[in-house]
Amino acid sequence: MGKFQKKFNEAETVFNFEDVILLPGLSKVEPKEIDLRTKFSKNIPINIPLVSSPMDTVTEAEMAIALARHGGIGVIHRNCSNEEELEMVKAVKRSESFIIREVVTISKEAKVGEAAEIMRKHKISGLPVVENNRLVGIITGRDVRFTDPSVTVSEAMTKDIVVAKPGVTPEEAVELMKKHKVEKLPVVDKEGKLVGLITYRDVALRGEYKDATRDGEGRLRVAAAVSPFDLERAKLLSKYADALVIDVAHFHNENVIEATKKLVKEAGVDVVIGNLGTKEGVLDSVSRIDGVAGLRVGIGSGSVCITTEVTRTGAPTLFAVSQAANALEEIDAEMPIIADGGVRNPGDIALAVAFGASCAMLGYVFAGCKESPSPMTIINDRYFKLHRGMGSQSARQKRMAVDRYAVLSKEIPEGTEVWIPYKGEVASIINEFASGMKAAMGYAGASNITELQRKRKFAKIISKKEKVGISINQLK
Ligand code: XMP
């Protein structure tokens, strides 16, 4: 046998979601009892295994807020300036903080007219009054509405204030507010200094979204994409974001690994690396970078990827998950694996998880939702939203995308643009995916993700089911 023939015979078999099936197993649980809790990265637990892609037609603040409220997490894209990305991250953190830390205040010498103006500008309904950082009163919309604007704040404010201690829990805060019929609760330390503010709206929202992904202070969690070479952006974002995601098409690269080593040291938050596709890639990266908090895997399987067509290289997502899981097992390391690219159905995620992933990253599925930042159009009386690869011509025209998919001498686009059917609010898609994953796990006889990974049984598909007829949806 010639050398080439031998190499060919020994080649790995790659596979993806459509090539494998999860086999049914003895089940002792009903789908609704199934627990989907998992991890996004080492220190970030999530309640459903759903993450949104850092793409400029998928994840900006609105999508990240919606996903975190329903138990997943969004990764803000980086196809924008440092300031724009930071502002999106801050918007998520601000959206539902349990204790507001950057409180807008006023001094007691100021005039009521000024207080009214500040409230209007910041769209808030009350201001704590402070003197040398110490809380001396509170002035609300009601106080200013019925007072002459030239009167000083000290004359119009309420002096007898109900306050909370820094360690207050959301439940205690609600109880205090109900008891004293107040909607704002300043948080004051031992010296009487104002250290935060709790509003009824924010604590009430916590009840509405019980499964939300929150940090220790009750704020929604969010991750942000960065280039490994942009240390300045990484440092800026890590002050606010819960995690950074290194966002390069091919992580297994000397320069990328070296740059990431430095970035992880400086970041101070979880750093997820990717994209990786092979066992060697994972081993090289994890052994050389101290403190990696997660792996984003899959190369070329994304809906708008043309990497594999253009370059004939890639690592299909399910194959990449199994490679990463094998690598971690070999070095006895544990960290979340994020399956990225090509997910269309809940069963794809169940498969990825069964192969060793902790969660999946979705672009296409979320791009079609109301909360995605992409434009909408009407074609033949039907609504469509735009989805584009971050390596597409138009995305690359925006500065940061060039970092991710640049081919230094000749630049070839590695992504396309498509119009996809509008799917409505992301909450209903999340529900659909959660139910579908639970159904899959029910068939496999697993009551949670760890059990699915322990009990998993697969089969290879060699005969594909042929579709018959035209679906009713197509006729509509
Ligand atoms: P889906 O299938 O969910 O995949 O839309 C999302 C993932 O696709 C990757 N991505 C790209 N890959 N060229 C590529 O080869 C591109 O232009 C491109 N844009 C995004 C990315 O990993 C994303 O999470």
Image: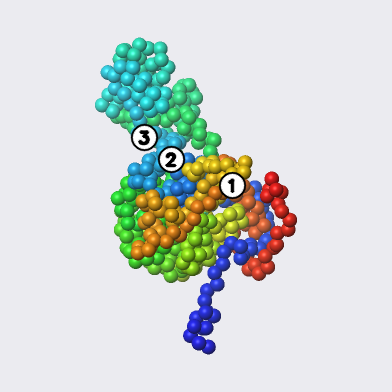
Look at the picture and state if 202 lies above or below 22: above
**Residue 194: percent from left, percent from top:** 33, 29
| Label 2 sits on residue | 92
Which three-letter amino acid code belongs to the residue tagged 2? Val
The label number, if any, that marks residue 101 in the structure image = 3
Extreme residue in the bottom direction: 1
Give the residue displayed 35% in from the left and 34% down from the top: 102
Of the pair 287 and 310, the residue shown nearer to us: 310
Image quadrant containing the C terminus = top right
Q: CA distance from mark 1 to mark 3?
A: 41 Å
Asked if labels 3 and 2 touch by Cβ distance under 8 angstroms, the answer is no
Q: Nearer the viewer, mark 1 or mark 2?
A: 1
Q: CA distance from mark 1 to mark 2?
A: 27 Å
The label number, if any, that marks residue 245 in the structure image = none
**Residue 312: percent from left, percent from top:** 49, 68
The disc, 1 or 3, on the residue closer to the chain's N-terminal end is 3
SS class, disc 2: helix
SS class, disc 1: strand
Q: In the rendered image, is residue 366 in sight?
A: no
Q: CA distance from mark 2 to mark 3?
A: 14 Å
Give the residue displayed 66% in from the left and 69% down from the top: 462
Of the pair 96 and 62, the residue shown nearer to us: 62
Q: In the rendered image, is residue 20 in sight?
A: yes
Give the residue displayed 39% in from the left and 68% down from the top: 284
Q: Can you tell which quarter of the image residue 210 is in?
A: top right
Which three-letter amino acid code belongs to the residue tagged 1? Pro
| Label 1 sits on residue | 421
- Left or right? Give the position of 10 relative to 33: left
Q: Residues within 10 Å of mark 2 (few under 14, many from 20)?
A: many
Asked if labels 3 and 1 touch by Cβ distance under 8 angstroms, the answer is no
- Left or right? Give the position of 262 relative to 455: left
